[in-house]
Structures are given as structure tokens and as C-alpha cells.
Image (spheres, grey):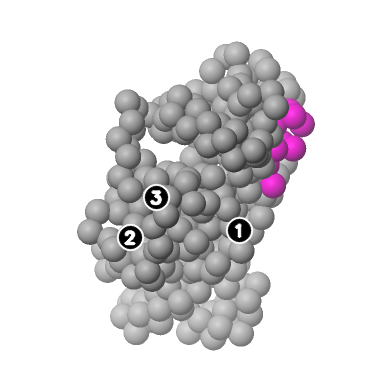
Amino acid sequence: MPAFLTDEYFERFRSLIYEASGIHFSESNRSILESRLKERLRTSATDVAEYYESIRANGTELNALLDSVTTNLTRFFRNTAHVQTFEYYVIPELVKLKRAAGSRLLRIWSAGCSTGEEPYTFAMILREVMPADFSAQIVASDLSLKSLMIAQEGFYAETRVQGVPPRHLTRYFERKPGGYRICDQIREMVRFDYHNLRNDSGLRDLDVVICRNVLIYFDETAQKAVVDRFWQALAPVSFLFIGHSESLFGMKTDFEFVRTDWAYIYRKRQGVRHER
């Protein structure tokens, strides 16, 4: 029986996906790509060759394929060390800087937000500890339209809110049949938008970029391009969160490594001009 995905079409599909999104499929995770392609072809008589030609001509189907190959694993208050660093270190630092500059607005980007648990988590923290005279804007983006629709709705099954502190669950969620819905007070702090990290977001002067467990899907070239775009999007003094298994070590970047009492993060250094 011939292989479902020949070497030739494995190369074609992974090149197409890489060019479109920066997501890199190595030989070791070839089986993941194969399983996602089988899912896309399950309801169609189209074979792999025909499907490849169809997605080259059909941007909608290409987006659907990219949606299917992304892994949308997330949860509320994921990585306690990052949550504590944001609450106890980053917010106080930014508040001091903003007050000195005469500003009262914090701007945050959750890049690769999946189904919304991450940006809603940070919105709850901001609502809890941000000074009353401050406001915050959170932009949350993802490559998966399906995930963004869930995030925008803000409804989560009971099993999905495990890990939310009881006080936050009472204050910021509404009990609904079958689960919980984020309250309007928190939902209004977050704007969801489709974005492919392969491209410039157009965002500028951000105080924080949170992009956790996304860079691991890119090769070194694509990682560097994404990090450079984060640099351009961030304000002169600002912070970058990446996944605990991710690192900028060995990458030519002007981000400064910061060790807090809770976790390691990165800071954009004031007055440094970034050479790309």
C-alpha cells in the first residue's frame, strides 16, 4: 500500500505551511502533519495531490489547514511563576514608568492567545491590582479562527475553569448552564483579532508582549523574525514573556534577560537601537 504522504508531498506541504506561517515541520513530527491532512480529507474524495493544488489556489482552505496544524493547549492562570511576575514585578514597574511619563494606559499583546484563557487571566490580574486611575488595553491574536471564536464568546465548560482561584471565579465569571462565561467587565478589556506572526501586526508602543509556547513551532530563522517584530512593537521600556521552555539565548537580539523573584522574562532596554 503506498504511503499516505510521500516524501515529495511532505516536502511540498511543509514548505507551503512554512512560507504561509513560519510553522516548521521536521521529520520527527511528520506524523502530526499526516494526521491533520487526513482530518482535512476525511469528508472529501480529494487525494493528497489534488488537495495540495486546491489549497494553493484557495486561501480559505489554506487558513483552515493552518488552523488544524496549530496546537491550542492553554488554561487559565497557566504558569504560576509568570502570573506572579506579571502581578508583583511588571505591573508595579510599568506603573512607576507611566506615572513619571504622565501616562495612565497599559497596552498588552497576547500573541498566540488560543481560546482566550491567557488574555483573560492577565485582564483579571490587571483589574485586581492596577491603580484606579489607570486603564489597560489587551489585544489578543491567533492564527486559529476557530479558537478566536471561542475566545470572543468567553464561555468555558466547568472543566476548563479548573485552576481559577475561587475569588476570581466568583467575581469575574457568570455561572451558565454547562459552564461559566467571562463577565463583561473583563471581556471588554480584551480585543481579539486574527493575526499571522509571519507578518507585522502593526502594533506599536506596547508595554508587554506575551507569546508563550509559540516560538517552539518555528525554526531559528522564523523565530528571529518574530522576535524582531516584537521588538518593533514594544515601547522603549517594556517586557516580553515567552514560554518556560523557550529562550532567546544565542539569538542576536537586544532584549535584556531579567531574573525576578518568580520567573525569568525579557526587557526591551531603553535607548538601545535594534539592528535587524
Screen quadrant of the C terminus = bottom left
Q: Which amino acid type is shown beneath numbered disc 2?
A: Thr
Q: Position of residue 193 (x, y in %)?
A: 66, 55
Under circle 1, the secondary element is loop
Spatial CA span between label 3 and label 1: 18 Å
Q: From the image, tell me which residue sits under label 2.
A: 253
Q: From the image, tell me which residue sits under label 1.
A: 203
Q: Which amino acid type is shown beneath numbered disc 3?
A: Arg
Under circle 3, the secondary element is loop
Q: Position of residue 86 (x, y in %)?
A: 47, 32
Give me the residue at 60% from left, 58% from top. Answer: 203
Region rendered in magenta: 183-191
Neighbour tally class for label 3: few under 14, some 14-19, many 20 plus, Cα within 10 Å: some
Under circle 2, the secondary element is loop
In this rendering, position of residue 66 left or right of residue 220: right
Residue 210 higher or lower than 123, as above or below: below
